[in-house]
Image: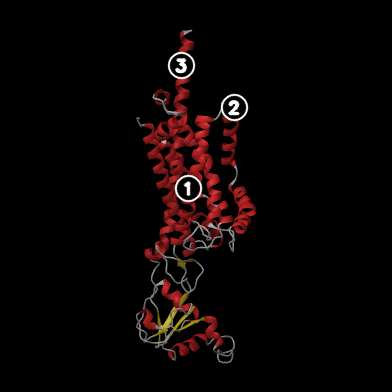
Amino acid sequence: MDIKRKKRRGLQAWVSWWIEKILAASGGITAFIILLIVVFLFKEGVGLFQSPRVDEGYVLLMHSSNEVDQLSADELKGIFDEDITNWAEVGGKNQAITSLRLDQIMDRFTEEELGGEYEYLSQRMGELIATTPGVIAFVPTLYAPLDHPAVQAMTDNTIALRDFFVGKEWIPTATPVPLFGTLPLVMGTLWVSLFAILIALPLGLGVAIYLAELASPRVRSLLKPVIELLAGIPSVVYGFFGLVVLVPWVQRVLDLPVGETAFVGSLILAIMALPTLISVAEESMKKTPRALREASLALGATHWQTIYKVVVPYASSGISAGVVLGIGRALGETMAVLMVTGNAALIPHTLMQPVRTIPATIAAELGEAAAGGSHYQALFLLGAILFLMTLIVNLMAEALAKKQHNKGF
């Protein structure tokens, strides 16, 4: 019997050793994969700041007498949109600006003047720039008359950090220079997420108090699965519900030109954040020591006074953790927000405006961005920003949870 017992113990120790090693290997592999994803995300994104502003194969040409050799992305947009009409507005001479693209240049000549098959287009372009001192032309490098003495190419800088992080316009397909201003996307993401929590917090806290303190065991056993079921509904279903039901209702009731607004996005995200908020808050309230409740009641406090004077303050760290986790859920939501917020890359000023969030932008544009191009890299950098935002939220939730665990009263 002793031999069998020793063999059994040896087998159990061997199995336990292998289980421990398998679990350790699983954790190590998971951490390594996450690290690879993060490194890949940042590696692809940081390449944006080494990319030229003007797309490969194109060049900006000016008259050689022009003293302006550098322009910002916003200035170039203003020039080609004809909002800036004089070189003096961008630090040059008092001279009218003539902005031209290839099709506009070709319209100035007949096919005979261009040599039938446009073989003399470069020569004609050089003559046009030579006779138009205030010109700026956006043309393919193939046709650029760079050897003409009256023609010079504008210095093409790389995309600046300032243009990306504080730029106010996101127009990745703009020419001659795409605009990658992330401020509207970051503001839209924060705007929708924060208002979603402001809507979800009183509702979630009320339901959590009811489940933890007031509901009978039977009612609690019925409500808990229903609330947890909300967390399992696919986000596209929430988005479809918002698009079909909430968007027309908000547009009609509030008399808005469009119903796809930040307000509808906040409502949808509030519903999606409720299960997390309710579950965490309820568990925190249930952990309130029985002695504290009894002491409060023994001192003459009513049941409601005990709830808001003892239970809720004791569970405040856990409630805060639930709020932070709800914000984290809202920050990363994609499909539901994509369907109901209107996707307008504008800095929001009210909840009744269409907005665009970072996850929705990545989902909508990544399939159309050329791999390795500046648009592709900008979307990966947006993913890195979203990763950092979510990481900060998760660290806050962890810190609040530890505070709750170590809290005395």
Q: Position of residue 395 (x, y in %)?
A: 39, 43
- Residue type, numbered disc 2: Arg
Label 3, label 2: how far apart the Cα atoms are:
46 Å
Residue at which label 2 appears = 218
Query: Farthest residue toward the top?
Result: 1
Residue at which label 3 appears = 9
- Under circle 1, the secondary element is helix
- Residue 384 horizontal side relative to residue 333, left or right: left
Residue at which label 1 appears = 198
Label 3, label 1: how far apart the Cα atoms are:
57 Å
Q: Residues within 10 Å of mark 2 (few under 14, many from 20)?
A: few
- Residue type, numbered disc 1: Leu
Tell me what residue is drawn at x 40 percent, y 59 percent: 46
- Looking at the image, do the residues carrying marks 3 and 2 touch, with CB atoms under 8 Å apart? no
Q: Looking at the image, tell me whether mark 3 or mark 2 is earlier in sequence order.
A: 3
- Under circle 3, the secondary element is helix
Residue 182 visible in the displayed image: no
Q: Looking at the image, tell me whether mark 1 or mark 2 is earlier in sequence order.
A: 1
Label 1, label 2: how far apart the Cα atoms are:
30 Å
Instruction: Reply above or below: 157 against 84.
Output: above
Instruction: Reply above or below: 2 against 142.
Output: above
Q: Nearer the viewer, mark 3 or mark 2?
A: 2
- Residue type, numbered disc 3: Arg
